[in-house]
Structure formats: structure tokens, C-alpha cells
Amino acid sequence: MKRLLRALGIVLCLVIASHAFGQSTCSYNTYQWNTKEKRAVNYQKVVHPYSQLSDEERDPITGCTVCIEDQVKISIPPVKPFYVCKVIAPEIQNILEGLIRSGESIVDVTGYRVGKTRGGVDKQGNRTKFSNHAYGVAIDINPEQNGLYDKCIEFGVGCRLIRGGRWEPGKRCESIEPDGFIVRAFKELGYLWGGEIQGRQKDFMHFSLTGY
């Protein structure tokens, strides 16, 4: 039932978005991740009419876009303000406020951040697909205690930390527990946790509708 309600909610969001996103201009700063140099490259500012949005600039699940004009600032002390897409902003604010009130140690959240960090690579080794953060539909919680690992089909000593800090649930209070309140609260709303994604990477800080 929860998944059905979530699906119906997304459909409603798409309908609302088609009317609410009546912007005249789309603007954003972006970059590409270079897999050879292991760093961000090709920084640029993009500005064009909103009516000229390409398919890659819009999230197919929520209708959210890479445009800063479609993002909303979330302020939940003591967390530093961050941005997410206006479609999911109310539920993200509510869930985080509830978790913090209940005593969960949430000290740092990252939302909207436009970059091509996924997908295939071009001849120069640059990623070619926007991440879910680029649309403002993913958040990272306490990255310094919930790192991104590769070579990690199952978490263990062979996993390699490539971003953020070590994930040590039970030892570090800001590390997200697999069966803890944070994971359960987001799952109830239909979000997936990056610590449970399939494949060679585990992203313990990350929550989105796809887990990636």
C-alpha cells in the first residue's frame, strides 16, 4: 500500500510540476567527473530558456530539473542550509525535522549539486550522465561518517573508501545504522539507501528514490 501511495504521489507531483515549473530561465553550475584523473573537470555555468530543457536536464521520475530556479532551501538547525527540488522539499524537511527531534545525530546534509558523475565515459574519461543530486532528488547525510566505497559488492575489509569518511556503525554515532531509524524512516517514504545498492559501490550517506 505504501508503495502504491508513493507511486500515486509521484504522478501527482508530475502533474503539479508541469504547472509549477513555469520558469522563464534555467540556470545552473555543473562539472564532469574525470575517471582517469579522479577529479572534477569542465566546470561551466549554463543559462538558457526554461522552454529549451533537454531530456537529460529533467528527472524522469519526479519531473525535477537541474535548474536552480526549481530548488528550495531547507533550513533545519543545527544543519547547514541545503537545497532540494521543490517537489520533494516538504517531505524531506518533515522527515529530517522528525529524526532530529527524536535524537538522531544528523549534523551535515547535502542535497542539490549539479554534476555529471554517473553513466558511461567519453574519450577523455569524463562521466556523461547527471547524478540524482543534480535534480535535487537525493540527499547525503553525515558524509564524514558514512563514506562512498567501491570494490564493495559486500561490505568488508576489501572495500575501498573513495569519498567521505569511514562508515563504522556502532562505533561512530553519526554513522547510519542499517536497521536504524534514519534508514527506516526514508524507506517508509519510498526512498532507498545507498548502503544497500547492488553492484561494486556502497554509498552509506546517500538516499534517493533509486538508491543511486
Image: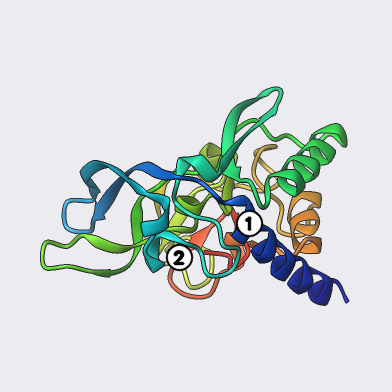
- Image quadrant in which the N terminus is located: bottom right
Q: Residues at badges 2 and 1 in contact (C-beta under 8 Å)?
A: no
The structure residue drawn at horizontal position 55% and vertical position 43%, both measured from the top left corner, is 111
Query: Is 45 located above or below residue 18 in the figure?
Result: above
Residue 36 visible within the image = yes
The residue at which mark 2 appears reads as 201
What's the residue type where badge 1 is placed? His
Q: Position of residue 153 (x, y in %)?
A: 48, 73
Q: Position of residue 170 (x, y in %)?
A: 71, 46
Sequence-wise, which precedes: disc 2 or disc 1? 1
Residue 205 visible within the image = no
Query: Is 104 located above or below residue 54 in the figure?
Result: above
The structure residue drawn at horizontal position 65% and vertical position 30%, both measured from the top left corner, is 107
Q: Position of residue 113 (x, y in %)?
A: 44, 44
**Can you tell which mark lies on residue 128?**
none
Q: Position of residue 20 (x, y in %)?
A: 63, 51
Query: Is 146 located above or below residue 14 in the figure?
Result: above
Describe the colour scheme in one phrase.
rainbow
Question: Is residue 45 found left or right of 186 in the rendered image?
Answer: left
- Give SS at disc 2: loop
The structure residue drawn at horizontal position 43% and vertical position 58%, both measured from the top left corner, is 131
Disc 1 crowd rating (10 Å Cα; few below 14, some 14-19, many 20+) is: few
The residue at which mark 1 appears reads as 19
What's the residue type where badge 2 is placed? Gln
Q: How many marks?
A: 2
Nearer to me, 4 or 78 = 4
Question: Is residue 160 found left or right of 174 in the rendered image?
Answer: left
Disc 2 crowd rating (10 Å Cα; few below 14, some 14-19, many 20+) is: many
Q: CA distance from mark 2 to mark 1?
A: 37 Å
Which of the 4 quarters of the picture holds residue 64? bottom right
- Give SS at disc 1: helix
Nearer to me, 130 or 196 = 130
